[in-house]
Structures are given as structure tokens and as C-alpha cells.
Image (cartoon, grey):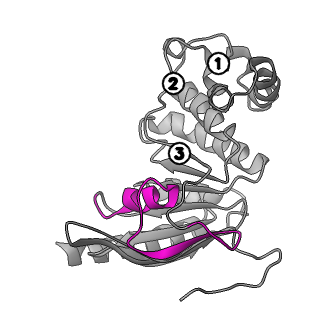
């Protein structure tokens, strides 16, 4: 059954209703329902193999759902190819291109003139502190810098939705801290609607406006949390600890049931 929402400021930007998917008659995900507002950052937590990547692939249009519907601004886009940016754990920068040409790849793919592409990309690289590195090649960059370049490339695709599959997992814990702050600034700069997969509870709480936990067999959403991150020193606050305990307890409960 389709659920219609009133249009206006609180209208869902993207909404999934009763999404189901099976492989070889084995149900992987069942009746997944969630929504995102324009500009929200939403994360999915769950153990490996629970179905997070399958859900991402359906959302991206790489795989078809067996049942359910997906809406973009109230338009049914179920099982259609979507204008999305999808970034995996690896940065996938081309080693023979410098930073500027790597971030301009989305423009090149869309047939945009190189001069125009540079004019679009350079102000963004300046805004987010990468301009001085534009002539460097991936082999000359640190791990954190490579991820920043990959994020900018995804950002410049000018997509309806940004999907990130564990984009910080290859970084050490110290590098992550600086990249987190940079990432939030970049995403919020143009109100990008973002969904990412992570196994890191702290990461999810710090970066997200909303968290969904996937568990059970077949997978379903067993907990959703709206995160209020307007507190000074949020990562050391009692509020942060409270979110952590709720998520940790939920994950432990369903891990025990699955085992």
C-alpha cells in the first residue's frame, strides 16, 4: 500500500516502502521502510552479511526489489536507474590522473568540456582545502587525502543521492577524526542527501542525523534513532554515551538471537 505524505518543508525526499529481496528463494531483506529528508545524513549499522549492501544496491538501482516501492520527491522510481553517487571502501582514484582530473571525471563522463569542468571543480577544491594539491597524483597523497579527493569526485557528480559503503574503513583512527569533520562540512555545504554503511558505532553517531539498525533473518530495521548533535563537545557528552548504549544493547541483543 502506498503512503502519501503532505507536501511542504517536511516532505520526504526519498522514501522506501516495504522493500523485499530474496536470492535462490532465501529471503535476505523483508519489509524495509525508511525515509530521508533533503540534506539528511543517514547511516545503517548491522553485522556483516545482514543485507546492508543488498539494500544499497536496490536503492541505487543496481538490483531490483522483489516487492515494495521507492519514491523520490513523491515520484515512484522503483527499480529505475537513479542519479546517484556511489562510493565504496576503496577510493578508486585513477593513478595516471592528477587530483584535478580525477575529481573532474564525472564531468568528462557527462561530456562536459574540460575548461567548464575545471571552472566547476576548482572553487570546490579551494573551498575544501585541496587546491594546493591539484597537480599531485594519487601515489603522492596520504590515505586521508585520497579519501578527500574521492569524496569531492562523488560530490561533483551532482546526484540526487550520495551512497557511501564504509568510506572511512581504510583510514587509521587518528586520520578519521580530521576527515569526519571535513566530510560533514562538505556534505552540508550544498545540502546533500547522504546514506552510508558503517560498522563503527561512534562514527555513525557523530556523522548522522538518523541511524537505522538492520538485524534478524531476513533483515529488517529493528531500531531507528534521531541524533541531536547540537551539543558542545558532543563526542564526550552524556548524550553521545546514551546513544552508544542504546545502539550497542540493540546490536548485542540481535547478535545473541542470531547465534
Callouts 1 and 3 close, C-beta under 8 Å: no
Q: Is residue 159 above or below residue 230?
A: above
> Which residue was labeled with disc 2?
93
Callouts 2 and 3 close, C-beta under 8 Å: no
> Which residue was labeled with disc 1?
101
Stretch of the chain drawn in magenta: 49-77
Q: What distance separates the C-alpha of mark 2 from that of mark 3?
A: 14 Å
The residue tagged with tag 3: helix, strand or loop?
Answer: strand
Please identify the quarter of the rendering in which residue 32 is found: bottom left
Residue 86, numbered label:
3
The residue tagged with tag 1: helix, strand or loop?
Answer: helix
Q: Residue 102: x and y, percent?
A: 60, 22
Residue located 39% across and 69% down the image: 248
Q: Residue 206: x and y, percent?
A: 58, 56
Q: Is residue 62 above or below residue 212?
A: above
Which circle's residue, 1 or 3, is located before the other in the chain?
A: 3
Q: What distance separates the C-alpha of mark 1 from that of mark 3?
A: 19 Å
Residue located 50% across and 20% down the image: 94
Residue located 52% across and 75% down the image: 69
Please identify the quarter of the rendering in which residue 20 is found: bottom left
Which circle's residue, 1 or 2, is located before the other in the chain?
A: 2
Q: Is residue 257 above or below residue 236?
A: below
Q: Residue 204: x and y, percent?
A: 52, 58
Amino acid at each position: 500500500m502506498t503512503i502519501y505524505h503532505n507536501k511542504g518543508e517536511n516532505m520526504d525526499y526519498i522514501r522506501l516502502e516495504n522493500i523485499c529481496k530474496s536470492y535462490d528463494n532465501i529471503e535476505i531483506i523483508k519489509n524495509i521502510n525508511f525515509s530521508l529528508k533533503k540534506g539528511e545524513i543517514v547511516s545503517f549499522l548491522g553485522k556483516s552479511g545482514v543485507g546492508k549492501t543488498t539494500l544499497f544496491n536496490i536503492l541505487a538501482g543496481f538490483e531490483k526489489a522483489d516487492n515494495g516501492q521507492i519514491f523520490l520527491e513523491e515520484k515512484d522510481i522503483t527499480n529505475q536507474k537513479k542519479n546517484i553517487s556511489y562510493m565504496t571502501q576503496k577510493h578508486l582514484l585513477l593513478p595516471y590522473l592528477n587530483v584535478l582530473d580525477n575529481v573532474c571525471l564525472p564531468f568528462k563522463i557527462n561530456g562536459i568540456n574540460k575548461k567548464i569542468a575545471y571552472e566547476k571543480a576548482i572553487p570546490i577544491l579551494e573551498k575544501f582545502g585541496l587546491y594546493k594539491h591539484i597537480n599531485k597524483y594519487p601515489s603522492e597523497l596520504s590515505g586521508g587525502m585520497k579519501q578527500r579527493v574521492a569524496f569531492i569526485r562523488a560530490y561533483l557528480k551532482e546526484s540526487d543521492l550520495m551512497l557511501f559503503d564504509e568510506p572511512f574503513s581504510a583510514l587509521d583512527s587518528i586520520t578519521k577524526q580530521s576527515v569526519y569533520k571535513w566530510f560533514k562540512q562538505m556534505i552540508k555545504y550544498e545540502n546533500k542527501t547522504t546514506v552510508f554503511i558503517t560498522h563503527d558505532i561512534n562514527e555513525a553517531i557523530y556523522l548522522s542525523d538518523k541511524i537505522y539498525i538492520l538485524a534478524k533473518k531476513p533483515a529488517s530495521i529493528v531500531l531507528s534513532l534521531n541524533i541531536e548533535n547540537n551539543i558542545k563537545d558532543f563526542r564526550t557528552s552524556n548524550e553521545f554515551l546514551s546513544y552508544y548504549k542504546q545502539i550497542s544493547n540493540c546490536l548485542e541483543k540481535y547478535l545473541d538471537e542470531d547465534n
